[in-house]
Image: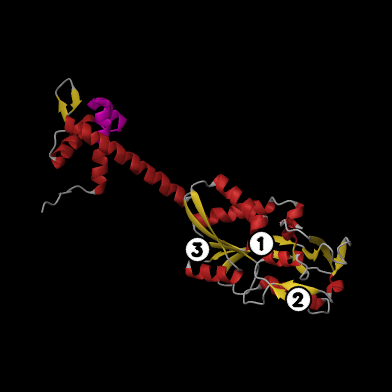
Amino acid sequence: MCTERYPMSIDMELRHLRYFIALAEELHFGKAAARMHITQPPLSRQIKELEKELEVTLFARNNKVVKLTEPGRIFLEHTRRLRELLDQAIKTTRKAQRGEYGRLAIGYLGGAAYHLLPNVLRHFRDNHPDVEPVLHEMITLEQLEALSRGGIDVGIMRPTYGLDECNSEVILRERFVVALPSNHKLAGRHEIHIRNLAQEKFVMLPPTPGGGLYRQILKLCLRAKFEPKTVQVATQTRSIVGLVGAGIGISIVPSSVQRMNISNVVYKRLRGVRSYAEMVIVWRKDGETPVVAQFLRAVREAAASLTPLERS
């Protein structure tokens, strides 16, 4: 069994290759030395060392002419490719350090896909085309679990408990509206006081651990001196609004839900409510990589650019 011998260190090898390429392209020791910012004797010595290590004659030379040998020509082809690969590796590594290259796993609530997330992704991809976003639609609790095990890098969710172990930042505040079947007796009103919903049948989110929006809507009703009469539960906002359109009941939802194109549903501003539906971005305290930092910047800029309709 034959084992190849590589006696030079990586530093020496790369230096030898740079000198070799310069001489092979210039075919003149003086010009090659000037290009490499050294004098001719060190260049000549480095080329001789390279030929000795390779046990190959790379150049045919005399006092007047320097020419590549056939082995030298072949070696030049390969070393040029190696140089290109090395240059690309350096560029890519530097881009990764700046957060401009890599992969980003993003968890998000379905509700974010109708207004916030498209703006964020458009802005982020325009400015960071070499970062691959990998999207995972998850409820809040699933996002927290995925963050803890490293399954996602950032999460876009509703505020909830359990965020103390992560960094979090509010990126959006929305008013609440009431979603009604289009033939509902209150559908003709411009706005509705929350107390007028006390006798209505509600389609609600489930009271699951991590269900921050459910608890917030429940508190709104309790402050208005009634507990919502839940007749149907659905885990996704689109399902909730679809059930409203089917006449199953009404629901209190964030105003961005109005962007859903679901028939037989009307939305009315809710009076008597002072709190807002918030959306937060969450990331691990030890997980602010350069790519995550760039994404956070994109989220802030995209959220700031939302129109009044998207915010209210």
Sequence-wise, the earlier of marks 2 and 3 is 2
Q: Give SS at disc 1.
A: helix
Residue identified by numbered label 3:
287
Question: In this picture, which residue range is highlighted in magenta?
Answer: 19-39
Most common SS among magenta residues: helix
Picture quarter with the C terminus: bottom right
- Residue flagged by tag 1: what amino acid is it? Gly
Does residue 32 show up magenta in the picture? yes
Residue under circle 2? Answer: 219
Along the line of sight, which residue is nearer the eye, 250 or 10? 250
Q: Earlier in the sequence, mark 3 or mark 1?
A: 1
The label number, if any, that marks residue 111 in the structure image: 1
Amino acid type at circle 3 is Gly
Q: Nearer the viewer, mark 2 or mark 1?
A: 1
Q: Residues within 10 Å of mark 1 (few under 14, many from 20)?
A: many
How many numbered circles are shown? 3
